Amino acid sequence: MEKHENVEYVMLSEEQIVARTKELAVQLDKLYEGRTPVVICVLKGSVLFFSELIRNMKTTLTIDFMSVSSYGSGTTSTGELKVKQDLSTDIKGRDVLIVEDIIDSGNTLYHLKKMLNQRLPSSVNIVTLLDKPERREVPMEPEYTGFVIEDEFVIGYGLDYAEEYRNLPYIGVLKRSVYEN
Ligand code: IMP
Ligand code: MG
């Protein structure tokens, strides 16, 4: 695969991502057998992984979208999470699967999971394409992980730097020269 000039190296190829996503879909089908989960795409970064995942799942499911941003570790008990776009589904009594692109500090998902739990779903699970456990600031263990990666800033397959590169079909490490000067 021809790589973008701002990519230092390709960390995960499209083939690797697709193969791993298929494995995750098999596991999730088993988990949700006989149930109808609502699968939530956390915009915007998850959009490619989400699409690949749901089209490989055979379980009957519904989908919804949400856009949030984290304020970091948060100094107040409320408002740690800014909801830019909320779900259109009532998740009370539903099995919720949150699909995330990457878990870094863990703040976003920690607060998102807490918020969704207040709506009384029957279960909440998290599947993330990437995990950078070294960077964790709050306890956050996803139930399903595509790849555990080193502490590098990655782009592509939905992930951005300054809103760009989301359309790269692979996960690449961004050249330091792009963000350091
Ligand atoms: P957390 O709240 O620190 O876990 O942040 C998660 C969010 O930060 C992700 O959903 C991404 O939007 C962003 N993020 C963290 N690491 C990276 C990266 O290496 N590349 C692109 N975005 C990242
Ligand atoms: Mg994101």
Image (cartoon, helix red, strand yellow):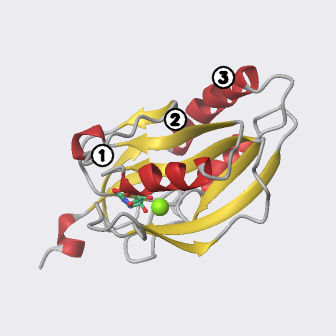
Q: Residue furthest left?
A: 181
Q: Amino acid at mark 2?
A: Gln
In the displayed structure, 178 sits above or below 57; it is below
Circle 1: element type: loop
Give the mark toward the camera: 3 or 2: 3
Could you tell whether 82 is left or right of 43 in the image?
A: left
Q: Nearer the viewer, residue 113 or 120?
A: 120
> Which of marks 2 and 3 precedes in the sequence?
2
Instruction: Report which residue position mark 1 lands on.
Output: 138
Relative height, residue 95 to residue 101 (above, below) = above
Q: Quadrant of the rendered structure where residue 48 is? A: bottom right
Q: Are marks 3 and 1 in contact (CB under 8 Å)?
A: no
- Under mark 3, the amino acid is Gln
Q: Position of residue 62 (x, y in %)?
A: 83, 48
Residues at marks 2 and 1, CA–CA distance in whole angstroms: 29 Å
**Residue at position x 30%, y 52% from top?**
105
Point out the tag, 2 or 1, that comes first from the N-terminus: 2
Q: Position of residue 56 (x, y in %)?
A: 75, 36
Please give the residue where the numbered disc 2 appears in the rendered image. 16
Mark-to-mark CA distance, 3 and 1: 26 Å
First reached walking from the N terminus: tag 3 or tag 1: 3
Q: Is residue 8 visible?
A: yes
Crowding near the residue tagged with mark 2, few <14, some 14–19, many ≥20 C-alpha atoms within 10 Å: some
Residue at 45% x, 76% y is: 163
Residue 172 at x, y percent in the picture? 37, 53
* Residue on which disc 3 sits: 27
Residue 137 to residue 158: above or below: above
Q: Specify whether 79 is left or right of 93.
A: left
Label 3 SS = helix
Give coordinates of residue 127: x percent, y percent: 56, 39
- When asked about the image quadrant of residue 2, the answer is bottom left
Q: Residues within 10 Å of mark 3 (few under 14, many from 20)?
A: few
